Image: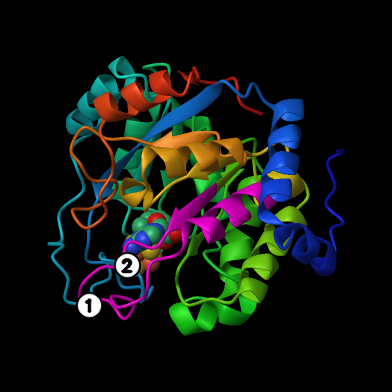
Amino acid sequence: MKIRSDWQPAEIELIHNTPLLDLIYQAASVHRQYHDSKKIQVCKLISIKTGGCPEDCGYCAQSSRYKTEVKPQALLEKETVVNIARVAKESGVSRVCMGAAWREVRDNSQFEQVLEMVKDVTALGLEVCCTLGMLTEAQVKRLEDAGLYAYNHNLDTSRDYYSTIITTRTYDDRLNTIKNVRKTNVTVCSGGILGLGESVADRVSMLHTLATLCPHPNSVPINILSQVEGTPLENQPHVPIWDVVRVIATARIIMPAADVRLSAGRARLSQVEQALCFLAGANSIFSSDNGHMLTVTTACPGYDADREMLNLLGLEARPSFVGK
Ligand code: SAM
Ligand code: SF4
């Protein structure tokens, strides 16, 4: 399987709709051509600025437009972030993602503080990823100079379905930030969410947009919606595990070298279900010591439980800076 960016939507649809066990087998084979199938990257998400976001993303606990459990908080102190990162590293984490509930980065003192956090967490020997909203080219350059390894900016869903979920920015705004990141050596992390009420055609379309970026995103998070009380999507039904496995396997086949990350929503999957996701090509998880991934409303398994699961499955945590 060679790396291609000229995928047609119909080809991706055909792969996505392959009989399930054949699809898993194909994805597992491609996975073994490009990756050490024993290695899983364990990541830790730190919400450095929680809540009070002006955007209206229909799934998000942090949007100020919805009444959720999340209380807006100030930007965390650098020392707090570095301490969380240090504990994470001791627990087998090799990548730390710092998230802020911002629409975009502004050139102010808070950005200066984030740059300092990037420097200090990178100095611990960790891959640092940031997800701070929209960025200009000059801002990415400054993050790169501070040592940033990756920038996350999810497409979330298809171009057609996007405005049903988010109205305060466009799909092209999203792609434009990714383009700005690509002007530097910072790697791109971009994926989506399953369970927003999207159709199979929307899933295929989002995968097509990702797999026709040239080069592909280095990292593709596949989130499962955590239904948050108070948001417009609070009553969405759970996504069947088979849909999750199909999307992971398809992403693995069409973007063979990317890290495919089993991200939000993993807390509700059994070990058997997670094992199927790993077989289908997922090679990364988010783990936490405080029981939640990003905010109090998104549960996340703990370091110890995850270490036990990896041991049970004969898997090992991957060190930093060995991904592509
Ligand atoms: N504000 C920045 C942005 O939107 O790019 C970064 C933070 S945002 C919380 C990061 C990602 O988390 C979103 O793009 C979305 O894919 C995911 N996410 C947020 N809330 C979620 C939820 N309730 N369920 C699943 N995924 C979620
Ligand atoms: Fe804000 Fe990001 Fe949440 Fe959207 S997903 S409301 S941009 S924090």
Left/right of residue 77 with respect to residue 220 in the rendered view: left
Residue 11 drawn in magenta: no
Q: Left or right: 176 with respect to 208?
A: left
Is residue 146 shown left or right of residue 83? right
Q: Secondary structure at mark 1?
A: loop
Q: Is residue 251 visible?
A: yes
Type of amino acid under label 2: Cys
Q: Residue at x 77, y 61 (%)?
A: 12
Is 234 included in the stretch rendered in magenta? Answer: yes
Marks counted in the figure total 2
Say what amino acid the circle numbered 1 marks: Tyr
Q: Any mark on residue 66, and which?
A: 1
Give the quadrant of residue 234: bottom left
Residue at 34%, 22% in the rendered image = 307
- Range shown magenta: 221-250
Q: Secondary structure at mark 2?
A: loop
Q: Dividing the image into 4 quarters, which one contains the N terminus?
A: top right
Residue behind label 2 places its C-beta within 8 angstroms of ligand 2: yes
Quarter that holds the C terminus: top right
Mark 2 and mark 1: span between their CA atoms? 8 Å
- Quickly name the residue at label 2: 60
Name the quadrant containing residue 252. Answer: top right
Residue shown at 59% from the left, 36% from the top: 279
